[in-house]
Image (tube, helix red, strand yellow):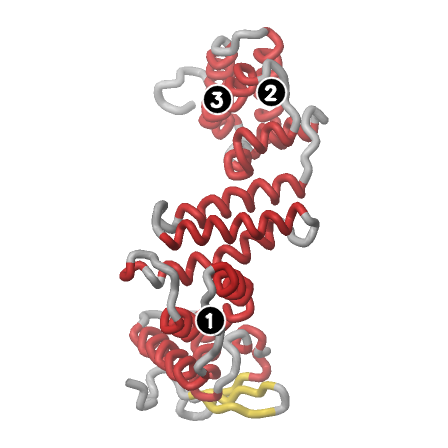
Amino acid sequence: MPAGRGNTCESCYWRDTFLKRLTLDEAGLSSPHFASLFREFGMWLLMQVPAQKAALAIHRYFPFFYDMEKRWGKIPTYPQLVAHFDAEGLRRVRLPMRWLTETSQVIVDPQQREDASDRRRIDAIIASIPSGTPASTVLIAYKGALQARIAAGAATLRTVRLSLRPAASLFATCEKTGFNLPEQADLDRYLVEVPGQKAAITGFISFINKRYDMKLLARLDEKRTSSLRRKKLEAEIVALVAQKGRSDEFRIKWISVGLAYFHGLPRSVGPKVANGAISTDDNGNFSIQWNEKSYWLPRWDYHTGVG
């Protein structure tokens, strides 16, 4: 037997500890109904996880039941739970929610869960730009225009979130100018950094052009974009060479970055290359077979001339 526990075995000790803590929490609930619900959940929990884990976790779940009792006096509907706790809050009480759904006391609506998550992210996007600034005013107006599209059945909350994110990111580049409306140079610089966002930012550019009588163009400077991409890849190669350890994960990353830097292939190619399509010569340099073509890559300790 463990020292200090007399004749009580480890499992019995933690079960007894759990039951004591469960009884203590029950006393904190006013109604016999919720006290009974909490005990039912506790005994279910004890069947799902080891007694030690249940004993350590039970206090953490008490506030969830306490809030339900004080706010509703009964088990609320899923929409009510999401509205009060939000999707992130419900994720922190995953096991009580699982018990509620398994016992048919709550019926989960996946779409409402996703919508709640999107609302939280939308609020975070709006809050990322200082309130009272021109950028914040414009972003809120853009949100309103997007929400009008939801009311008309032409958009979803996910669409709103995905549209607001690049708009906020563009405004973040205007911090030095007091978060004013972006100028063409700001937009050009943003698209050089994230050329893949051109399509996503187009809707916002159309909005501010129309609302504020501007003439911004969402355009790509291919030369500057290519140059910046190459510099970033070069920096990654230098960082990889400096790394210690050469795991399989390292080799995949080396091939991904190397194919992008030396041959202009997409970064996504590296993980897709089959092991049988990779060979090395006597010096350890790689020969990669991809789409019926052969690509040479230097070994990481080979002098490439980078930098």
**In the image, residue 287 above or below residue 49:** below
Identity of the amino acid at label 2? Met
Q: Nearer the viewer, residue 227 or 171?
A: 171
Given this view, does label 1 or label 2 mark the residue nearer the observer?
1
Q: Position of residue 249 (x, y in %)?
A: 46, 69
Give the distance between the C-alpha atoms of the residues marked 1 and 2, in whole angstroms. Answer: 65 Å
Image point (48%, 77%), residue name: 219
In the image, what residue occupies the spot 58% across and 84% down?
277
Q: Nearer the viewer, residue 153 or 23?
A: 153
Cα distance between the residues tagged 3 and 1: 54 Å
Q: Quadrant of the N terminus?
A: top left
Secondary structure under the numbered disc 3 in the rendered image: helix
For marks 1 and 2 on the same chain, the one whose residue lies earlier in the sequence: 2
Identified at 59% across, 78% down, the residue is 274
Q: Please name the residue that numbered disc 2 is placed on.
A: 43
- Residue that badge 1 annotates: 215
Q: Is residue 247 above or below residue 296?
A: above
**Mark 1: secondary structure:** loop
Residue 76's image quarter? Answer: top right
Local packing at callout 2 (Cα closer than 10 Å; few below 14, some 14-19, many 20+) is: some
User: Which sits earlier in the primary sequence, circle 2 or circle 3?
Assistant: 2
Q: Position of residue 170 (x, y in %)?
A: 41, 62
Residue 259, can we see it? yes
| Residue 79 placement (x, y as % from top left) | 63, 31
How far is the residue under mark 2 from the one under mark 3? 17 Å
Kindly give the residue lying farthest to the right in the view shown. Answer: 104
Residue occupying the point 49% across, 50% down: 141
Nearest to viewer (mark 2 / mark 3):
3
Query: Which residue is the site of mark 3?
Result: 63
Callout 2: SS:
helix
Residue kind at label 3, given as amino acid type:
Pro
